[in-house]
Image: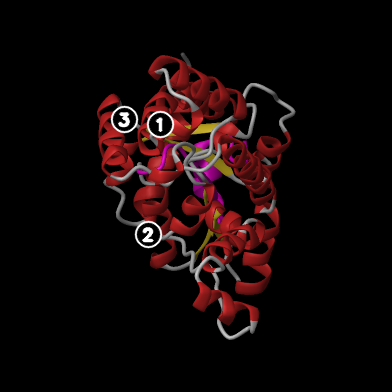
Amino acid sequence: MFYETAEDWRDCSAKRVLFFGMSGLGKTYVSNMLRDAGGWFHYSIDYRIGTRYMGEHIADNFKREAMRVPLLRDLLLSDSVYIASNITFNNLAPLSTYLGKPGNPEKGGIRFADYTRRQDQHRRAEIAALLDTPHFIARAQELYGYGNFVCDSSGSICEVVDPDDPEDEVLRCLSDHLLLVWIRGSEAHAEELIRRFRRAPKPMYYDPAFLHAKWEEYCRTNKVTEDEVDPDDFVTWTYSQALAHRAPRYAAMARNWGVAVDAEAIAKVGTPADLEALIANALEARGAPG
């Protein structure tokens, strides 16, 4: 790990952390808090994915839809209008919209083959964005003078790494440059995340083996063909399955590559000093015997 002990963490004048865990448990909240307090550079993996690596895919998808409208088609072909994604750290809707949901096209679904193709694009983009982290650490220091650095990772980070492989390229790269911190939720958090998701289902990225298994299971259990699948129902059901799928992967990442803090504790963090104390405690707990 980048910091082996609480003393290493406390004594370091340039603190570097990466938060991981399910979306909705506080990664972006605490990252925004650090940035707004001053002295911290905030690197968002999802933002990097949606701009550097998938921005063209997202914009082309918008243009494809616009080309179906005669007025917009003429304006696009004459370069009279410009269509682009307005993705931000706090609004990742363009990326989610592009990933889409598989199923009945009359309910907003796309073909499963197109869905898996976009999933693969996201996988490659996420790995690339994670491996860009050292570049942004150096950029933050050299260009802006920031020694403190926080990486706000995607909830799907556990889907693109092997936490039990000591030679995993992504985790090795990250652990050589920052402290990996899992924001660990409880069963109550999981229930609340599922309730939120039911209210507003959104596209997600999943490990290919998991996704294909769940697609086949859903179609078989509900006795539906691809064009009969309700897109919102499928992604909601898959999300609830994914919570159990991801939990042990997050736990292995924390066990082998970093530390864990509880989501309840993160919610109480109001200042950088609060966070520094919380992480110091986590490092002490990791190093304690037994």
Spatial CA distance of label 1 from label 2 is 35 Å
Residue appearing at x 44%, y 38% in the figure: 104
Spatial CA distance of label 3 from label 2 is 24 Å
Label 2 sits on a secondary structure element that is helix
Whether residue 260 is visible here, answered yes or no, is yes
Answer few, some or many: residues within 10 Å of disc 3's Cα (few below 14, many 20 plus, some between 14 and 19). Answer: some
The answer to whether residue 118 is above or below residue 55 is: above
Nearer to us in this view, 277 or 43: 43
Q: Amino acid at mark 2?
A: Met
Q: Quadrant of the N terminus?
A: top right
The answer to whether residue 62 is above or below residue 117 is: below
Which mark identifies residue 28?
A: none
Q: Earlier in the sequence, mark 3 or mark 2?
A: 2
Whether residue 150 is visible here, answered yes or no, is no
Q: Earlier in the sequence, mark 1 or mark 2?
A: 2
Q: Is 9 within the magenta?
A: yes
Label 3 sits on a secondary structure element that is helix
Magenta residues?
1-24
Kindly identify which residue carries mark 2.
33
Kindly identify which residue carries mark 3.
190
Query: In the rendered view, does 250 fall on the left or right side of 168?
Result: left
Kindly identify which residue carries mark 1.
234
Percent from the top left, x then y, of residue 223? 42, 17
Q: Is 218 within the magenta?
A: no
> Foreground mark, 1 or 2?
1
Nearer to us in this view, 258 or 87: 87
Spatial CA distance of label 3 from label 1 is 18 Å
Label 1 sits on a secondary structure element that is helix
Q: Amino acid at mark 3?
A: Ala
The answer to whether residue 259 is above or below residue 106 is: above
Query: In the rendered view, does 91 fall on the left or right side of 168?
Result: left
